[in-house]
Image: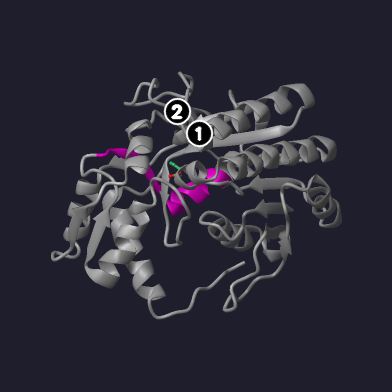
Amino acid sequence: RVLITGSLGQLGRGLNSVYKYMYGSECVVMSDIVRLPANATDVSDYNYLDILNQGSIEEIVVNKNIDTIVHFSALLSAIGETNVPLALQVNCRGVENILQVAAKHKLKVFIPSTIGAFGPTTPRENTPDLTVQCPTTIYGVSKVYAERLGEYFNHRFGVDFRSMRFPGIISATKPGGGTTDYAIQIFYDALQKGKHTCYLRPDTRLPMMYDTDCMASIIQLLSAESESLKRRTYNVTGFSFTPEEIADAIRRVMPDFEIDYDICPTRQAIADSWPKSLDDSEARKDWGWNPEYGLEETVQVMFALLRREEDKPTKIVS
Ligand code: VAH
């Protein structure tokens, strides 16, 4: 049975649906710190869980007989810079609590890392798994800490810790406070206004991945045999593009779409410190990572999903 923290966030809701579909709803326990939206439907086992309270994590793990935690709760890169003390609490203390509970109750743990765990001194093209990691955001610093702490708990206490450095994830769910958020907002704006004002420069290249591939990577990494994993933290990526290039791809579907630019210095500086493309060959070799979606497929599926959503209230599927 899997416990998902931050399960109402961008990735949590999708993973919850995937787990329910693959293994049945009795196999997934959702948690977060906010009430369910009033129009939420199909939520089978949703729990309040403050990850800063280790006892509460333990209570759910024991009461619900959890063997795996997918720990999504985190403050993302842009919002982290606006509240460093909270980012330290959520991203560092939260991870410490999860790993300590995992050690005590012998759990498997997945904690996502990010391209944000790299920084301006990292080679930016085809960035490998093992390289310089000196990030300049509190998000990045806390994710390097999570990677190191997870690996430490693995070799010191035998915790089955697994992690991936995700690029920006494009999904038909609103993200919260990241630097790559524009790559989702652009679709909502295209449908609602025919126009998007981008906070990054037109030539800012970043690695990205479509939601379905992201979910598949989590399921695949979590089901890989421990012996096949040569490391505990892997790079994974889908494809890289710039705002200009995604706008062109959108125009191939919606010819009148317009983009203009109003640069946000904080987010631009963050994006400029991150890799433009990732080398994920180790994940491909060790556990069969093989993404399916490119830019064109992503544009197609995002429009299809959001057009459907336009007629419906927000739905939480568990
Ligand atoms: C952010 N989406 O923008 C996150 C992320 C790839 C970066 O981890 O902060």
Residue 252 visible within the image: no
Type of amino acid under label 2: Phe
Q: Looking at the rendered structure, which numbered label has been put on residue 118?
A: 2
Would residue 241 be found to the left or right of residue 227 on screen?
left
The residue shown at (66%, 52%) is 5
Q: Which residues are magenta?
A: 204-218
Comes first in the chain, label 2 or label 1: 2
Badge 1 element: helix
Residue 181 locus on image (x, y percent):
39, 52
Determine whether label 2 and label 1 are within 8 Å by CB.
yes
Measure the C-alpha gap from mark 2 to mark 1: 7 Å
The residue shown at (36%, 42%) is 267
Q: Quadrant of the C terminus?
A: bottom right
Type of amino acid under label 1: Gly
Q: Please say whether residue 208 is one of the residues in the magenta stretch.
A: yes
Q: Which residue is mark 1?
A: 140
Crowding at dot 2, Cα within 10 Å, few <14 / some 14-19 / many 20+, comes out as many
Residue 48 locus on image (x, y percent):
73, 61
